[in-house]
């Protein structure tokens, strides 16, 4: 399938396409290779629609977040710096969605070079998003629970260096994509050209998935759950400032959104991994069901890029205040123009009335 597992299709390529990429035949019933027409038809309709919606809404929302943050850069908090990088990673990930939508609908027609670039870009930004959330949670944890400031606005360089380290680490994690991603015709999918991973052995494929499960979900999940459970307990037992509680509430909402959008996919992928390599009586029906489930749940995960801006706007008081401050001048100018237009119309009407009366 063309769905990139973690990224629209980049990861999908990796994860979802994993089902096809690793030189192992899709389970066969009675010695016959399973037909993938059902899952192909589902992804050809489902993915382009959902990816298009995510692309438009995500770019608008994250673009607005970047605009607000850039306008208020002199008052950035530590969390704002991480949120800035988070929005950038979301936008870069979203930019790959149109490619994966085309891949799902008609096949990959952009060449191997662009396949590697899009796949690596997707993976870098997926990992970057979760690692930045982990950094924010650690900062909140030390700040609230231990009253220790990991970062300080007086030392912004340390925050930027931390973000740079995250980006570099995520780039290193994308090296397998630069090596093993390529476009190729798959005879099991009607000779459709797809951008997918082609590892040298099944062991490499399993190792890739294990690495994703550990670094892309389990480890960050443990950090997030531990940090915010401790933070919430501390806030309930002590008297923390209102501003600090609001900051924690925003980040907690981001974390909850991440789990809601990505947990179904990770569970489905884990089931697919175990089923593919442990089951001895695989059936075509089960294989097709897993393919469809991977497509649906991975697409839900991609929608996470659209959720963050909404949370900033509805949960973050500071963000709303900054946004309203930026809108006020525009509202004032629009209001002035409307009043001027109405005044002119009124003057014209008065003149017409006086002329009529004269006659």
Image (spheres, rainbow, N blue to C red):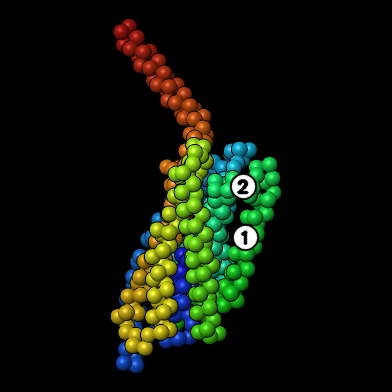
The one of 219 and 336 positioned closer to us in this rendering: 219
Residue 51 to residue 357: above or below: below
Residue at the far front: name it: 237
Closer to the eye: label 1 or 2: 2
- Nearest the viewer among 316 and 95 is 316
Q: Earlier in the sequence, mark 1 or mark 2?
A: 2
* Residue 103, visible in the rendered structure: no
Q: Position of residue 14 (x, y in %)?
A: 49, 73
Q: Quadrant of the N terminus?
A: bottom left
Label 2 crowd (10 A; few <14 / some 14-19 / many >=20):
few
Where is residue 281, by image quadrant?
Answer: bottom left
User: In the rendered view, would you say 332 is above or below 249?
Assistant: above
Which secondary structure lies at badge 1? helix
Instruction: Tell whether 232 sits left or right of 359.
Output: right
The residue depicted at 62 percent of the width and 60 percent of the height is 167
In this view, which residue lies farthest toward the bottom?
31
x and y, in percent, of residue 318 in the image:
50, 38
Element type at mark 2: loop
Task: Check residue 232 in the rendering and tell me which mark sits there, or answer none.
Answer: none
- Which of 134 and 289 lies nearest the eye of the viewer? 134
Assign the C terminus to one quadrant of the image: top left
Q: Is residue 219 visible?
A: yes
Pointer 2: what residue? 148
Residue 77 placement (x, y as % from top left) = 59, 42
The disc label shown at residue 167, or none: 1
Q: Residue at x 43, y 68 (%)?
A: 266
The residue at the point 40 percent across, 56 percent down is 53
Q: Which class describes the residues within 10 Å of circle 1: few (<14), some (14-19), or many (20+)?
A: many
């Amino acid at each position: 399938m063309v769905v990139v597992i973690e990224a629209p299709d980049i990861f999908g390529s990796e994860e979802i396409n994993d089902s096809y990429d690793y030189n192992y035949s899709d389970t066969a019933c009675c010695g016959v290779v399973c037909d993938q027409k059902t899952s192909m038809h589902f992804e050809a309709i489902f993915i382009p629609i959902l990816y298009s919606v995510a692309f438009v809404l995500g770019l608008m929302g994250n673009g607005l977040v970047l605009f607000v943050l850039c306008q208020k850069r002199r008052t950035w908090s530590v969390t704002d710096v991480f949120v800035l990088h988070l929005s950038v990673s979301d936008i870069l990930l979203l930019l790959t969605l149109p490619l994966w939508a085309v891949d799902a609908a008609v096949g990959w027609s952009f060449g191997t070079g662009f396949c590697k670039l899009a796949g690596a870009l997707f993976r870098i930004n997926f990992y970057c998003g979760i690692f930045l959330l982990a950094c924010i949670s650690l900062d909140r944890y030390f700040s609230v629970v231990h009253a220790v400031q990991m970062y300080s606005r007086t030392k912004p360089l340390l925050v930027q260096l931390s973000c740079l380290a995250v980006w570099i680490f995520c780039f290193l994690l994308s090296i397998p994509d630069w090596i093993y991603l390529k476009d190729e015709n798959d005879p099991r999918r009607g000779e459709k050209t797809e951008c997918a991973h082609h590892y040298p052995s099944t062991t490499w494929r399993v190792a890739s998935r294990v690495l994703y499960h550990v670094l892309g979900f389990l480890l960050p999940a443990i950090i997030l759950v531990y940090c915010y459970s401790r933070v919430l307990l501390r806030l309930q037992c002590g008297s923390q400032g209102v501003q600090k509680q609001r900051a924690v509430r925003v980040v907690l909402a981001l974390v909850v959104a991440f789990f809601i959008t990505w947990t179904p996919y990770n569970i489905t992928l884990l089931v697919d991994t175990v089923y593919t390599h442990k089951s001895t009586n695989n059936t075509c029906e089960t294989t097709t069901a897993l393919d469809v489930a991977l497509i649906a749940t991975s697409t839900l995960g991609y929608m996470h890029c659209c959720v963050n801006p909404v949370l900033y706007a509805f949960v973050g008081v500071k963000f709303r205040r900054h946004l309203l401050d930026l809108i006020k001048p525009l509202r004032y100018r629009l209001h002035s123009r409307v009043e001027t237009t109405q005044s002119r119309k009124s003057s014209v009407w008065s003149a017409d009335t006086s002329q009529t009366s004269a006659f």
